[in-house]
Amino acid sequence: MRKVSEIVEFCQELCEDLTFAAAREWKDAEPGRKVVGYMPVYVPRELIHAGGMLPLGILGGGDNLEVIHGDAYYQSYICRIPRSTVELAVTKRLDFVDGMLFPSICDVIRNLSGMWKMMFPEVYTRYFDVPQNYKDEIGGNYYEHELMELKQGLEGVCGRKIGDDDLRRSIAVYNENRRLVNAVYDFRTREPWKAPSWEVYLLIRAGMVLPVEAHSQLIEEYLAAAEAEDRPMRDNCRIILQGSFCEQPPLNLIKSIELAGCYIVDDDYMLVTRWLLEDVPSDGDPIRNLAQAFIKHSTETAAKYEPDGARKGKYLVDAVRTRAAEGVIFAAPSFCDPALAGRNIRRHHQTVG
Amino acid sequence: MSTATERDEVVKEPSMLKQKEMIADNYDRLTRAQELGLKVSSTYVPGNLNELVMCFDMLNNLPEINAIQNGMRKKSGGLIMDAEKMGHSEDVCTYVKADIGNMAKGAIAPNGKPMPVPDLLLLSYTGCFTFMKWFELLRDQYGCRTVMLHVPYEGDGKITQNMRDYVVKQLKEEVIPTFEEVSGVKFDIDRLREYLRKSAEAEDNFVWVLESAKSKPSPIDAYFGGVFYIGPIFTAFRGTDDAVEYYEILRKEIEGRLAAGEGPVTPEGDMSEEKYRLVVEGPPNWTSFRDFWKMFYDEGAVVVASTYTKVGGVYDYDGFRHDPDKPLESLADYCLGCYTNRNLPTRVDMIESYIDQYEADGFLVNSIKSCNSFSAGQLMMMREVEKRTGKPAAFIETDLVDPRYFSPANVKNRLESYFQMIEQKRRGGGPPARAA
């Protein structure tokens, strides 16, 4: 069994590798394999996986990438994730990616989908819209059709039909992965000294580039190793970090917060791994099940409309209670409209809650 | 007709006087809503459902129009700073902050009277994610009923039946029942049809006015003048007799200008010589609107087509009209088809067609800090349009209603250099060859 430090080192290498070597290796291992990239905040990765393809989370270039070409595409007042993603693409770091999905999160990512269509007409590119209405017959019905359209598009990429059984199997695999991710978060809540957030971050981030089965195995390995390791408990305060659901923070920011005396007991990094709050049934109509899971049991974030004003921000109040947090740090990236425009409401609800 | 050099005061044509009267009357009714026993719905310009709102005898209040009004009256700067002091980020849309700042000061309308608290927030928005956040803030502030109409984005450049069905279903099962409850008025689809018929009538004349700019010289400025022409059709007047009348008056005026071979009316009179014909992408700056416009007409630059005048509905490019025979479907198509709800490749196609059809000399982007919906991707759009048309393009940066982001000297410099660039291209032997 690997030690925690070895697992974390492996994850850090994956995180810092701007060539996406792991995903390239996966693709090259068998002829005909395809890779489909996706941006934050949520896409149903089960559909990609069911087509035998690798879902690849693209979170921009991070702080290790010098953006040169990307700046020619964006004005100074637009956030960094699209410009560093363009940088990755024009420097051919994403030249092995066969499809790109741009989820409904903000106007910048939305418009990037159109840019991608113009820049890479040979790549399957889709703006992936999700309903802001959560009634079965309205938003649910619309979303099922959208999922069907996405499935058809992905079938064009992988070159075969994606059957219901394929999809049911993938749903089960991702249910397991979500359970494990949640187990890591719960473990950190219970014993944050044993699972520092910079480690947890790297561990979950590895799931952006690894096949889901390998990621699940990695999490199990980490949980066992971290549990076994003896680490001192410190007199740190327990905080929740909010606002980085799209562009991810530099690793050193997380480390700095921890070094400053905080245990980060919850966050909104890489929400795609925890977007669905309950297992998706792995029997019955898989498309309907995915649609229902989204409209009935998905997490709240700034990119999602909450019809009940009284419930707005409640998730954060609840998280403070369930995670026994002592404070919340709002750390949104510059120029992030969804995070910054909603910050005052969440802060207000947090204070009164 | 007098010229810009002959008189300094703002020229008022009959259509302008008519619109001024309509706006004053609308603000008067809004600020006296309680006294008049009228209920108020707040909603947005892009994808606004004015005809539907009127079916319930309710008034339509548009927060971004209030922000524009405060911008043009030079009040928005202070309001934005007030909002920032309340904790709103510098990076957030300035329409939102101007509105929040205004609310904190009692939500004063342009007539100096306080705006009513809305009875309903109709979160009907198209092509702008920030609108959703804005209404969450308003909902939090007012605590009034809210109904959402989610309009999907045309990611693949077309309206699918699924999108249309989704919007229609929301109208039938969410929006209309909520309006009935709030207003106490039963929905009458024939009433909606009648309003839509009037909308289409006005839209025909509106499009005629926009397309008059194909003439040389253009009798209109389709950007600076255009923002006045879109006033009634984009706001609380679409579907009314007033709007029908306004566009009839406007059309007659433009017909007269065309017959006389006259150029556009500017705030300083008629523009004497048309030197440059431009297509402009992006909203204008409102805090220095007149100074900004002057930088164009002083140089003989006329905007013959603009994308901003399509933000509240695209009526020219693919011929959309509100259709009384398909009332709800037509409202859905209207919402789905607004300019910023169309994907970037479609926007580029549209601009290219304007440059061709209006025989423009160049393409200018006014990139707005506050508006990612418009701005994200504009640099690439500019390069693509330049490549396809061979026409020189230029890029300037300003903001909607935050005066801190309007730098007159920089903008003027850029524009003057740009006009020189167009001249140089001309001296180089006529229009450059089209890119393959």
Image (tube, rainbow, N blue to C red):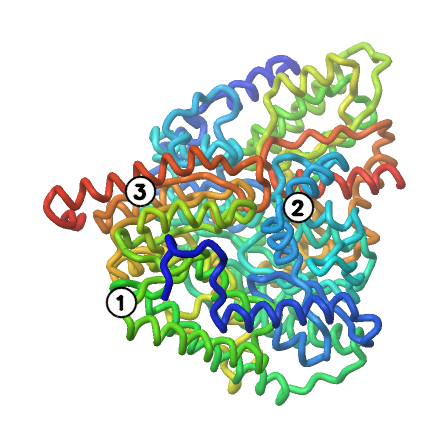
Determine the secondary structure under disc 3: helix
Q: Position of residue A8 (x, y in %)?
A: 61, 18
Distance from the alpha carbon under mark 1 to that under mark 3:
27 Å
Residue B215's disc is: 1
Q: Tell me which chain the residue with mark 1 is part of.
A: B
Q: Dot 3 corresponds to which residue?
A: B383
Determine the secondary structure under disc 2: loop
Mark 2 nearby-residue class (10 Å; few <14, some 14–19, many ≥20): some
Residue drawn at x 47%, y 69% is: B13
Residue drawn at x 75%, y 53% is: B138
Q: Quadrant of residue A21?
A: top left
Q: Is residue A314 visible to the viewer in this orientation of the structure?
A: yes
Q: Please state which of residues B79 and A209 is positioned toward the viewer in this rendering.
A: B79
Residue B75's disc is: 2
Q: Position of residue B56 (x, y in %)?
A: 72, 79
Q: Tell me which chain the residue with mark 2 is part of.
A: B
- Give the residue type that dot 3 points to: Arg
